[in-house]
Amino acid sequence: MRALALALAAVLATAAVGGCGNGANQPGPKGPTGGGDEDFKPAPGPGDMGSLPQEKVEELNDYFTKKGIQVSRCYQQEVERRGDRSFVGKVTVKLRIGKEGKASKVEILETTLKSPPVEQCIVEQILSWTMPELPNAIMWTWTFEFQPAW
């Protein structure tokens, strides 16, 4: 029961802020990447979705929000291992989403967790997802925020 409460609270505390953008000027550590060689058109920055229809942006935002529970499991495992209330932070990922909705080139742009096991798990989770189909491939960034429930 405690694990369920912690996982649920981690999900509720997982504030995800998504957006499109090519992320060209965003520094940060690089993580593992997925395959894929399909050409893509970088989407414009937030507020100007260009060739990506607004309903697709909203669909991706909803998708990442709902997948927060899956990603929170990566964090929860580390919280339980550490037993440390001060283990909190954010992880920002950048990925390419192909027209068919598959992620590739997933990398960690920024992290305050500084936890390679959590970051690797997040990357693996994202690579396994099938997102909504898109009119063209895009680059996407998303920030997950984590804090324990107890």
Image (cartoon, grey):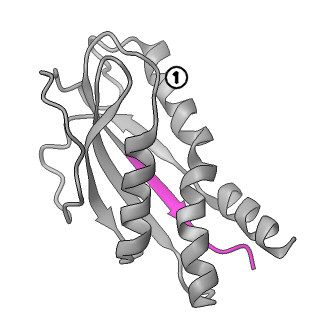
Q: Mark 1 sits on what residue?
A: 59
Give the left or right position of residue 25, taking residue 60 as reference: left
Mark 1 element type: helix
Give the left or right position of residue 3, taking residue 86 as reference: right
**Pointer 1: residues within 10 angstroms few (<14), some, or many (20+)?**
some
Q: Quadrant of the C terminus?
A: bottom right
Q: Nearer the viewer, residue 5 or 50?
A: 5
Q: Nearer the viewer, residue 15 or 39?
A: 39
Q: Which residues are magenta?
A: 142-150
From the top left corner, tell me how far across and down residue 6 is, in percent: 74, 70
Tell me which corner region of the image, top left, top right, bottom left or bottom right, holds residue 66: top right
Residue sitting at 59 percent across and 60 percent down? Answer: 72
Residue sitting at 81 percent across and 67 percent down? Answer: 5
Q: Quadrant of the N terminus?
A: bottom right
Q: Amino acid at mark 1?
A: Glu
Query: In the rendered view, would you say 36 is above or below 38?
Result: below
From the top left corner, tell me how far across and down residue 132 is, in percent: 46, 21
